Structure formats: C-alpha cells, structure tokens
Image (tube, grey):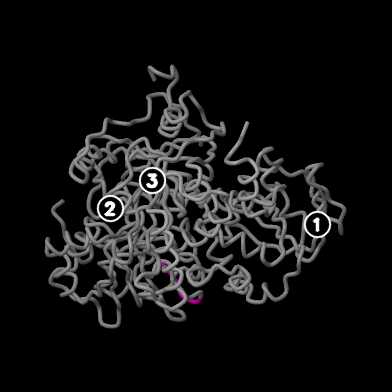
Amino acid sequence: MDIYNMPLTMAEKILSQKVGKAVSSGEIVVSDVDFLMAHDGTAPLAMEQFTKLDVDRVFNPSKILLVIDHAGPSPSDKVSNIHKMMREFVRKHGCHFCDVGYGICHQILVEEFVEPGMIVIGADSHTCTHGALGAFATGMGSTEVAVGMAYGQTWLKVPETIKVEVPRELKWPLSSKDVALHVIKELGADGANYMALEFVGEGIKKMSMDSRLTLTNMAVEAGAKVGFCPFDKVAQNFMLAERGKLFGYLEPDKNADYSDEITIDAPNIEPVVAVPHSVDNVKAVREVEGIEVDQVFIGTCTNGRVEDLQTAALILEGKKVKDGVRLIVQPASRKIYLKALKEGIIEKLLASGAIINPPGCGPCVGRHLGILGDDEVCLSTQNRNFIGRMGNPKAKIYLASPAVAAASAIKGVITSPTEVFKSDN
Amino acid sequence: MIIEGRVWKFGDNINTDLIIAGKYKFDTLDMRELAKHAFEAILPDFAEKVKEGDIIVAGRNFGCGSSREQAPQVLKALGLKVIVAESFARIFFRNAINSGILALECEGISKAVEEGEVLRVILDKGVAENVNKGVVLRFKPLPKFLEEIFMEGGFIPYVKKNKGIKIE
C-alpha cells in the first residue's frame, strides 16, 4: 500500500514488485521468470521446441527443474526412450533434475524451490498450487516453458481476483478438499477462468500448509490462473522448518479490488464428492452413499501429503479394506514416504490391506499403476474425474477427501467418515 | 485472411483429456501418431473423418483441464486451422495460438452453426459467417501481439524473429 499508493491483491502485489511499477488487473506485462518446471508429460515437447530456438543454452540452469513423475518407473519401451531424452537434456544443460521416485513435480517445488513473491511457470496446469506459498505460479504449455527456459521471460495478463472467505476453522470430518469442491461447485468449471483465487479468513489462518496446498491445487478446476493463500505465520514456520529460510509476510492489502467474493462456511459445508464426469458436479456424500467402488486411490499433488496419509491411517488402523476393493496409496514424494514410514503411517496402511505405490502421479494420469477396467468405479483423492482420466473411458471416477476415501475403502461403498470413525476433534 | 471450412460441433467444457487422452502423451512426440486418438472417447472416428481445413465450433470453456499442448498440436496435425468457441480455457487458448491455430471467442456461435455447415472466418473484419444460413457474428478481436504470433505461425517463429518476447 505504502509503495504503490493503491490497495493491491496478491496477484497485483507480486506482479507489481516484479515489473517495478504498480500494475492492476487487465494489464499485460512481460516479466522475468524466477522458476520453470516441466515433467515427463510436457518436458519432451518443451525440449523439442527449445531446440528450434536459436539459443545454445538455457538462460539459467539453477532456475529450471525437470521431473519424471507422470509415468515412472517407465511402463513401456517408448516411455523409457522419452525419459532418456530428458536425462540427456539435463546432462547437456545442467538444470535441476528429479528422476523416477523422487516425487510429484509440485511437491518437489514445495519442498525445495518455490519462495513467496516468485513468478513460477510450470508446464502443468496444477502449477497454481504454489500460490499457497505466496508465489505467482501458473500452468502454461510446453512451448511457453521452452521460451522461458531460453529467455527467462514470459508474458502475463494481470488477473482479476475472486476472494474466497473461509470464516471458521474446519472441524472433523471436513477437510480443505471439501472446501475446494464447494468452491468449484459454486463457481463452476470456468467461473474463475483467467482469474486468481484468494483464500482468506480464520479458516485459512488455522489451516496447515498441507491443507492449503490441496485448496490452491484445485484452483484450476474452476479455471483459475493461480490460487493464493496469504503468506502468514503458518507459511513462515513451514518455510523455516522445511528450508531453514525466513521470509516476511506477503498478504493482500485491505480494500483491494476483487471482482467477486464468496463465503464457504458451516453449516452450509459438509463432506462432498465430485461425481462423474466433471469436477464441478459436486454432491454431498450422503446423496451418493452406498455407491459401490472397485478401487480407492489416495495420493496425487492434491492429497498425497503426510497429513492426508495420516488421516487415512487413523481411519484404517485396526480395520481392513473391504474384500474385492483395491486401496492404492501413493505418497507425493520420497520425503513424505520416509516421514510416513518413520511415523508408522505406512505400516498401518499396509496392515489394513493397502497397496503402496512409489512416489509419483500414478493412476491419476492413466498410464500405469492402477488403470481401471470397463465400468469400474474409482473413488480418488485426485483433482480430475474427466472421462478416460484414469486410462479407461468406460470407467467412472468420484473425487473426495482422504477421509471419505479411507472410509469408503473399508465399506466398499461411498461412505461418510463419521460412519467408521469417531473423533474427539 | 479468410478461412472457410466444414464445421464439427462440440458442447461446453470439452477438456484436454477428451481432445487427447493423457495415457498416449508419454509415448511419442509424433503428433500425427497421437492425432489418431483425437476425441477418441467421444467421437471414435473423428481422426478418420476430419478433413484438412475443417473448423471446430464449441461451447464454453473449450480446452479446460490439463496444460498439455499436445491438444492443439494434434488438431493442427489433423489439418485444423481455426477453432471458434463461446469461450476457451486460458491455457488452451495460449497453447492454440502458440501452435499456430486460431482460437476465436465468439458469443452466440453455438446457436448460429450446426454440424456439417460451412463457416467462413474473415479475420480482418472480425466476423464469422455461417455460409449456409447467411448468419454473421462478430468475434472478440485478438490482442495485436497474439494476432502477430498466429500470423508468424506460432510462438517459436515469433520469438525467433523478435529474439524474445516483445510486447509494446
């Protein structure tokens, strides 16, 4: 406010700092990029495009990360050859590289690279996740990432912002996944197209970093360019613990200009699922309770973090996955996997009958590690339930929180977490 | 520039998983090979029947979902040059122009054209005309630099020519 003499949203503030003058929504800016990322579904095309540019080297290898997460360990010889291309590119250019088993690109960015105030461009739509750390992070195509890798720049339209107020702390069995699905239901699949979402209020202040990342990860499912949480005390402590670095608060100004404001509050919020075949097709768990499931998947960049696995283990401890149901659990990163091992989470999950996949995206992208059969039903903690998403256009995908997923794995039908677990919380 | 072609019509929220299923994209960078699977889940014979110069007309939020640039690139590989929709998802819109496909937002287009009819897009005048019915609609003009990117044949030739991103 002091510097620019006008109240700014998170998006306006970060972009203003970046370009060195006050900018407001609607303006198109050319900006330096602080970090770029691509994975095995998008990096090969980015590399091919890069070679068409008349540059020999990437602009700065320390600002570029390539990750093999979408189809690793490789399910075929063709995929292996694409992975080889990536390793060769990394050898030549010296950029950061995370090979098979390191984790999902977005989780790695959270653990090691993203900082508040950064401009982050990822060749993946869920790059919007990193707004939870106060970064202007957004998904683009392979070509734009290739150009960013060559010149260190991109163009952006400063987005309008929708303010999403969560005024009260979430209580069991609610999770930030339920909040995300409520928001998407209210806004629709394109309700925030070209815009930013800002999640604010007491409910966000009390939310862990893991929960916030779930929320911002889902922003693109309403079409948003990025989903922000204020970079506050919780975020500051997270960065101190995770990276040993101290960053100042980064918050929207009071009286910033929002194009719309919505409130997600009890008692109008309850555990929900997105039913086939769109993410904005959201129903209360009680409306779909009893639908049989063949597979339950807990993982992904949306819900594959320690808190998510912990919730699942709490519900599954001492119980068994229903006969005939496959429960697949996939930690989002090696770091998460190790932590879950040390805390006994993995043991509880295995004892209940769960299958543990190696860190990565797994069946969410439909290439391996849990492809569905014809007419099969999967309840997943991932972010998309589009036709064919999990490898079979004849299958049906329901999306829900880890709590609903774990409860449903025990019962073999879509189940409210309160049916199988009583919490004092 | 005038582009005329036979129309393929789609509804709202056509996502990039429907345009090209994710499971194929890890196998190859050959867009002609990938293009065989375009719209496979909803129109299994699309790739076989689509002809060079055909035009896609769609509803709201065309291209939502994944950032995969393979989506516009397979459509280009099939000979499509223009998509006219009520609206586009943001990433697809950028990817289309960057791939050298014209993505035009045109309110009312869904109701103005039926599958198989001929649409004529006159870029300089900013209009799309249903040749069969004589209905003319005005589309949202592209920002100048995006039109330049399209005219150069995509983002790579544009960046090569300008030695970077130059927007005034």
Residue B119: assigned label: 1
Residue A63: assigned label: 3
Q: CA distance from mark 2 to mark 1?
A: 50 Å
Q: Nearer the viewer, mark 2 or mark 3?
A: 3
Residue A416: give x, y in percent of width and height. Answer: 28, 63
Please state which amino acid type lies under the numbered disc 3: Lys
Residue A133: assigned label: none
Please state which amino acid type lies under the numbered disc 2: Leu
Residue A382: give x, y in percent of width and height. Answer: 37, 61
- Earlier residue among tags 2 and 3: 3
Does the magenta portion include A313?
Answer: no
Please state which amino acid type lies under the numbered disc 1: Leu
Q: CA distance from mark 2 to mark 3?
A: 37 Å
* Residue at 25% over, 78% down: A322
Residue A21: give x, y in percent of width and height. Answer: 48, 23
Q: Quadrant of the N terminus of chain A?
A: top left
Q: Nearer the viewer, residue A30 or A163?
A: A30
Q: Secondary structure at mark 3?
A: helix
Marks 2 and 3 in Cβ contact (< 8 Å): no
Q: Magenta residues?
A: A394-398
Residue A174: assigned label: 2
Q: Nearer the viewer, mark 1 or mark 3?
A: 3
**Mark 2 neighbour density, 10 Å: few (under 14) some (14–19) many (20 or more):** some
The relative height of residue A166 versus residue B50 in the rendered view (above or below) is above
